[in-house]
Amino acid sequence: MVSTRPLIPRALLLGNPTQVMPQISPDGRLLSYVAPLDGVLNIWVAPIEDLTQAMPVTGDRKRGIRSYGWAHTGSHLWYLQDIGGDENFHLYSVDIQGGEALDLTPCTAIQARVIGFSRKFQREALVGINDRDSGWHDVYRVDIVSGERHLLQENAGFAQFLCDDELRLRMAIRNTSDGGRDILVPGESGSWRDLLHIPREDVITTTPVAMGDPGGNIAYLLDSRGRDTAAAATLDLLSGEVVLLGGHPKTDVLHIEINPLTRHAEAYRTDYLRPEWTVLDPSVAEDYRRLAEYGDFRIAGRSDDDRIWVVAWSGDDNPGRYYLYERATGKMTFLFAARPDLEGWALAHMRSIAIPTRDGLDLVSYLTLPADRPDKADRPLPALPMVLLVHGGPWSRDVFGYNAEHQFWASRGYAVLSVNFRGSTGFGKAFVNAGDREWGGRMHDDLLDAVDWAVEQGIADRDRIAIMGGSYGGYAALVGLSFTPNVFACGIDIVGPSNLETLLASFPPYWAPLLETFARRTGDPRTEEGRNLLRGRSPLHRCGDIVKPLLIAQGTNDVRVTRAESDQIVGVMKRQGKPVTYVLYPDEGHGFARPENRLSFMATAEAFLAAFLGGERQEFEDELDGSSMRVIEGAEFIPGLCQAVSKRIAD
């Protein structure tokens, strides 16, 4: 239904932020950040004492910049950019004094990966480029000012490298045939020697994260070997000795904060029901105490002398506020808010809960209710329509904090529930490994258990629940409608695989190191048993059971979940005479980066859920203007979509 009360406009929640991602220059004199330039996210730079003097230093006109940083020259920034979501990222450098950005990886059909920078070699970077063999990234030493490069290491089957401040490769990671990983260090005459083996059961929860001491003989490690949750640890690259720094009994360490000068670990972050910092270095204890008084924070940047920090605060109803923190005095100077236009609107609160499963696991989950929904009432409150929002990966997790989609759907009158089902990361190796070979199995049972919990608590109306997600979450939506056709009232699949056999067969060449992981955790396409499992867990082969409305969205250039995954299930449903709406974005990949595309899709999804769950909605306005969205099938099933498409064509 159309709202009778003010709704938070889509663009305020889902459009470009005003200013985000601030970073301080190495000398502490300048601040960079990402903000729109003619509607496209670009990098801006300003004197730190006067942000009104900010000037754009990049001129992207298409997808916007989302990954960037300062080079140690202090006069250059680097950033990564692909074309149309194809994930063939190139590395660029730009002089903050002006001029065109320099493509440091000007090869065709390649992908660049940043390995490291160094204060000692300020003009240089180590970059992985798969120009010789598309499956493997050789390591080049690149001059970020001139663009000159030379080969440092030909990749002989390594998935990852770490370097030290001398820009020497000090560690390499290689996948093993048993599904594990080996950590190797340089040996004699250019060879590599084994240092440490990571068993298969620890692969997702054990990984090196950064180099430690300036001499390059210590690395920091997240380590679950011999325990369940991943702890912060050091690894001696000479002896192989591992020393634990600390951990949490219920959740993995997610981040180690490292001093940029000494390379000492100062604190680590965990997140069970709520995020939490544990301080390791007494010299920063007072800093963390001061910052924690303002709420959940993270350090977004530090000057090279470590006198000044850029700090970001956020919360469930705060999309981000940024401050300059002077350590010597404790002075806090406000920089800007990520979305100041949201101030004054009533944002909803998120609740952290642990939902029990039928077989005894606890699912850390996050529930958001409409902002005007009281926590308590004299009489039972009516159950709400609910959106079950399933995260992608599946080897990732949902977290407590500001979530634009939670806010968006809650503002339309829905309860919103995100569930860390088994297979999600962050809760120890037993939990993540419990998802092995359970795609569409017990992982889906966990989602059903969460739905039952929400209904039993009087939160959700059993007959008005949608399942929605991207990537694995899109697969979960297809599973929900095909495997359990009477549980959900409708589903929304965003770039989700419909056929696990074709998914694994279509990986890009540089994903070859991941094939063993997928084979062991989803089903091995090289064996008959594995193929049977993949086939049995593929929604494509059960789409004949779908009886509820389905909306599918796909990026044409997606290399992870290719367009064929959506095309094939839509084709089968069309031949079977089943209604399905299919929207395609020719200039997107695995998700929607351009704000015009995000807004057009969410306007479509909003109308879709309003039609089948009865929530409130904002009418189509000009969201399709500037969007590349093509409605391939089923515009007639979503109220207002045909008219919006016709208006765009007429305009």
Image (tube, helix red, strand yellow):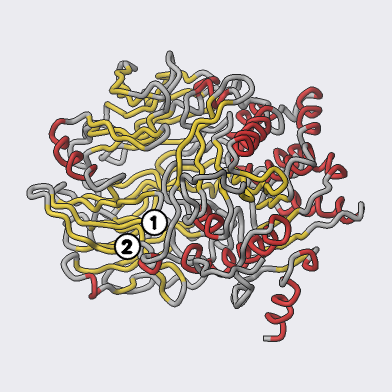
Q: Position of residue 355 (x, y in %)?
A: 54, 30
Look at label 1 and name its amino acid: Pro
Query: Is 532 placed left or right of 180 in the picture?
Result: right
Secondary structure beneath label 1: strand
Q: Position of residue 312 (x, y in %)?
A: 30, 52
* Label placed on residue 337: 2
As displayed, is residue 91 above or below residue 63? above
Query: Is 29 placed left or right of 379 in the picture?
Result: left
State how far apart marks 1 and 2 are (Cα).
Answer: 8 Å
Residue 210 visible (yes or no): no
Residue 42 in which image quadrant: bottom left
For image coordinates 62% across by 35% down, the residue present is: 456
Q: Extreme left residue here?
A: 329
Q: Nearer the viewer, residue 170 or 53?
A: 53
Secondary structure beneath label 2: strand
Residue 542 in which image quadrant: top right
* Label placed on residue 319: 1
Q: Quadrant of the N terminus?
A: bottom right
* Label placed on residue 194: none
As displayed, is residue 370 above or below residue 622? above
Q: Nearer the viewer, residue 2 or 44?
A: 2
Query: Is 84 placed left or right of 250 in the picture?
Result: right
Tell me whether the residue at label 1 lies in contact with that at label 2, contact meaning CB atoms closer than 8 angstroms.
yes
For image coordinates 30% across by 23% down, the residue present is: 246
Look at label 2 and name its amino acid: Ala
As displayed, is residue 559 above or below residue 631? above
Q: Extreme front residue here?
A: 378
Q: Extreme top residue here?
A: 226
Would you call the spot at circle 2 few (<14 residues within 10 Å), some (14-19), or many (20 or more)? many
Q: Position of residue 27 (x, y in %)?
A: 16, 56
